[in-house]
Amino acid sequence: MKKSHIVEKLLGDLSRYTPSNKAVTAYAPTNIALVKYWGKRNQELNLPMTSSLSVSLTDKGATTTLSVSAIAQDVFVLNGKPVPTTSVFYQRLLCYLDLFRPFKTFYFNVDIVSTVPIAAGLASSACGFAAMALALDKFFSWQLSSQQLSMLARLGSGSACRSIWPGFVEWHAGEREDGMDSYAEPLSVQWPELCIGLMIVSDKEKTIGSREAMQRTIETSELYKSWPQKVAHDLVILKKAIQEKDFDLLGKTAESNALAMHATMLSAWPPVSYYLPETISAMHRVWQARAEGVPVYFTQDAGPNLKLLFVDKDRARRYFPEIAVMQA
Ligand code: 2P0
């Protein structure tokens, strides 16, 4: 099934909608998964093998402004700089926007301002496509529900479906082939004391993108067979931890889930490793801090950097003075 079919299911006849004659703006936060999304059951529609659960960051995200281009060309600007038309990012954005513009009767002017630290392994595509879906809703006056916008954001990037909301968000994997039951929803619990500390061990380009890495893992990793069961178990525990504000249980579950995800990659062939020697050293520092009684845990995504989880900011900073602290 093509993305355009899903767009048609959600929006019906696209010729009913006309672009706004004014500029529209939307913001979406980036999110950090505590139970990870790793592996797709459908690559075209970004349908995941399992559900996942994330927390959005309060002040890191993307603000996207859309208007009709004054020239006969799409213009994409990221943090004040034009995006080269030959870049992967430009092409990915263009493919996405073309879903909503089957006939090129106008051109887009897209201005994205991102507060996500570049090259730090924070998902910029998540907040980017979520902000884009929200901006498009205003631009065409679709008036879609958040659930529908979550599905549209997913078509751009899987994890973007979680960035439609602040706070804790669960992405339901769904079972349908068309993915109409695969969207994210917020949990009702707030936990403002929860902090994420970004621990950058390297800002080098990653060697393999997460799309390719997750596909290779599915196809070749023996350990991946146990991943759905691990996720199902961790989701139950994590939701309990969030409900009861049990920080140690949250930290332990998130750290164990991230380690298990990386174990599935290590057992792929050729192996996928986002670990650098510095990543391992950083993990040992976290384990040492815990051994000394400091409640701090980590999670790691498709990159070498760690995200530390803690509630006591001052104590965590004393052990890890270099981290950038972000509020969940
Ligand atoms: C996550 N990651 O749950 C996991 C953990 C990376 C590791 O979501 O192919 O950029 O666009 O659906 O969403 C990264 O994957 O991938 C990701 P696509 P996406 O946050």
Image: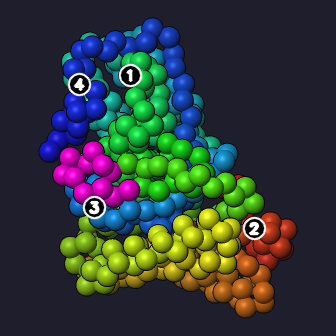
Q: Secondary structure at mark 2?
A: loop
CB-based contact (under 8 Å), mark 3 and mark 2? no
Give, as a single range, the part of the protein colored magenta.
172-182
Q: CA distance from mark 1 to mark 3?
A: 28 Å
> Which is more toward the observer, 306 or 180?
180
Reading the image, the residue beneath label 4 is: 12
Under circle 1, the secondary element is loop
171 versus 66 height, above or below = below
Q: In the image, which disc is placed on residue 40?
A: 3
Q: Quadrant of the C terminus?
A: bottom right
Q: Tag on residue 311?
A: 2
Residue occupying the point 32% across, 82% down: 226
Whether residue 175 is in magenta: the answer is yes
Badge 3: few (under 14), some or many (20 or more) residues near its Cα, within 10 Å?
some
Residue 237 visible in the current orientation: yes
Magenta includes 204?
Answer: no
- Say whether residue 98 is left or right of residue 250: left
- The local secondary structure at tag 3 comes to strand
Q: Position of residue 44 (x, y in %)?
A: 22, 49
